[in-house]
Image: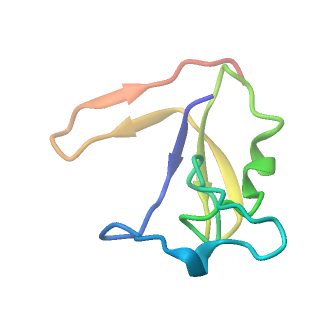
């Protein structure tokens, strides 16, 4: 299930004891890139539950939307196509 996700972070996020959840006592780091409280997991990965292995998905965090991508065109003019049946 490949995904294209925008990240606007420009550097690392350093964690300290104030990042620990007082109730749960844990820190969950987002691994999907969809969290609104990135780098912390907020459960946004649940949006990916119905993804198909046959598609490439583009997630727009600001719009909270998802599109199926059929190709990517790079700055040098080359492109990558995804020929899944829709």
- Left/right placement of residue 48 relative to residue 31 reads right
Task: Say which residue appears at 62% left-offset and 66% top-offset.
Answer: 61
Vertical arrangement, residue 1 with respect to residue 14, above or below: above
Q: Nearer the viewer, residue 3 or 71?
A: 3
Task: Say which residue appears at 44% left-offset and 62% top-offset.
Answer: 7
Q: Nearer the viewer, residue 27 or 68?
A: 27
Q: Find the residue positioned furthest to the left.
A: 76
Vertical arrangement, residue 53 with respect to residue 25, above or below: above
Q: Nearer the viewer, residue 27 or 85?
A: 27
Q: Find the residue positioned furthest to the bottom.
A: 18
Q: Nearer the viewer, residue 53 or 75?
A: 53
Vertical arrangement, residue 38 with respect to residue 68, above or below: below
Task: Say which residue appears at 65% left-offset and 72% top-offset.
Answer: 20
Assign the C terminus to one quadrant of the image.
Answer: top right
Vertical arrangement, residue 50 with respect to residue 24, above or below: above
- Residue 3 place in picture, x, y as percent: 56, 40
- Residue 13 place in picture, x, y as percent: 41, 70
Task: Say which residue appears at 54% left-offset and 64% top-offset.
Answer: 39
- Residue 63 place in picture, x, y as percent: 67, 70
- Left/right placement of residue 42 relative to residue 1 reads right
């Amino acid at each position: 299930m490949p995904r294209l996700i925008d990240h606007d972070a420009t550097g690392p996020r350093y964690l300290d004891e104030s990042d620990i959840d007082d109730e749960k006592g844990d820190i969950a780091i987002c691994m999907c890139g969809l969290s609104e409280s990135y780098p912390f997991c907020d459960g946004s990965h649940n949006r990916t539950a119905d993804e198909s292995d046959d598609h490439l998905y583009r997630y727009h965090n600001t719009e909270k939307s998802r599109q199926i991508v059929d190709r990517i065109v790079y700055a040098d003019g080359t492109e990558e196509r995804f020929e899944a049946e829709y």
